[in-house]
Amino acid sequence: MGESINRIIGMLEEIAPARLAETWDQVGLQVGDPNTPITTVAVALDPLPEVIYAAGEAGAGLLVTHHPLIFRPISSITPSNKTGQAIFAAIKSHVAVFAAHTNLDKAMGGVNDALAQTIGLTELEPLVPGAPEEMLKLTVFVPVGYEPMVRQALCRGAVGRIGAYDECTFQARGWGSFRPGANTSPFSGHKGQLNLESETRLEVLLPKTELSAALTRLHDVHPYEEPAYDVYPLVTAASSLGLGRVGRLSDIISLREFCLLLKDRLSIRGMRVVGDLNASIRRVAVCGGSGGDLTAQARRCGVDVLVTGDVTYHTALECAGGVPAVVDVGHFSSEVVVVAALAKMLADRCEREKLNITVLEMNNQSDPFTFFTDH
């Protein structure tokens, strides 16, 4: 029968929470019924008609893309443009379409981590750190033996996530006491009598925005009628998430050598470069997509080069002869690396939760720009 699209959306929310998206962005399910059962999910960069048809032919009931299918308001749906053609393709092929855009840009393991890791950068940190997020500590007391069930229920989305680690909790053993009232159905002990229960104190960190959902899940699985828990506000620190990434190469190389490395790692024929090809490169900033407006931030971070796409003429003029150097590898090439990364993250979660879901990478899309030379 398969799993509902909603179940997969829950996993995608863990990977790239919608709260990370820019306010102007359009993310989430854009076409389709979230209650539809599916057995196959496809992942692609763009929801092009040909990609959607190929996903349907491969048996996928859901296509997850980085770029949204519906980005600006539309007044009609006709096959006279790509958006209309894609919506028709989705309906005809019974393929739901889901977008993870700027939230996937910022998320751990998303577009910019995939680009940085493909290049070979280490010691990664955000180029533009996200806004500080109000964090809480949830402490719940669980009878011994029920810790795994409660932990698994709580640790979804950003609950229990610290950097690149998830299901982060702390446990300590102790004794809890309670006297069941006359109208209770106690998990253990007897009405009117004081009971001592061997319990585990389970602690987990979570964003304030996820507290309500976490408490709902807690009450759903906790064996007690009245679970005991505490919620503590924490001093808010800068987010480890954000736009772009800054990292280091293992060795100092010239800008010329760095461009050859990019050509090899990204499988591209060429790129546009602003800077001295003999300059030394060690500290690198990346921003998938259109990151030319981040040159000033890259300079403040002390990087030697910014790798991105869609660099304008005026940005190039501002950077000419200065630091950082700028390498424009193209919008497509700077983002397509996330397809394999997202497919793997989703497949790993399906495997961990023992879901019979196949995850496919759609590779029938290419850069719309052609690198032309008359040689």
Image (cartoon, rainbow, N blue to C red):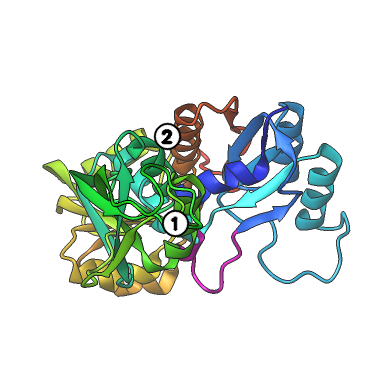
Q: Give the range drawn in magenta.
A: 15-27
Residue 276 position in % (x across, y down): 21, 57
Give the amino acid at mark 1: Ala
| Left or right, 302 with reference to 339 | left
Earlier in the chain: of badge 1 and badge 2, it is 1
Residue that badge 1 annotates: 214
- Residue under label 2: 267
> Is residue 8 found inside the magenta-colored segment of the image?
no
Give the SS element for disc 1: helix
Local secondary structure at mark 2: loop
Above/below status of 43 relative to 84: above
Give the image location of residue 188, x and y in percent: 38, 42
Please name whichever residue, 302 or 183, is drawn nearer the observer in this view of the structure: 183
How much space separates mark 1 and mark 2, taking CA atoms? 43 Å
Q: In this view, does 102 lie to the left or right of 87?
A: left
Camera sees residue 129: no
> Looking at the picture, how far across and down is residue 250, in whole percent?
13, 39
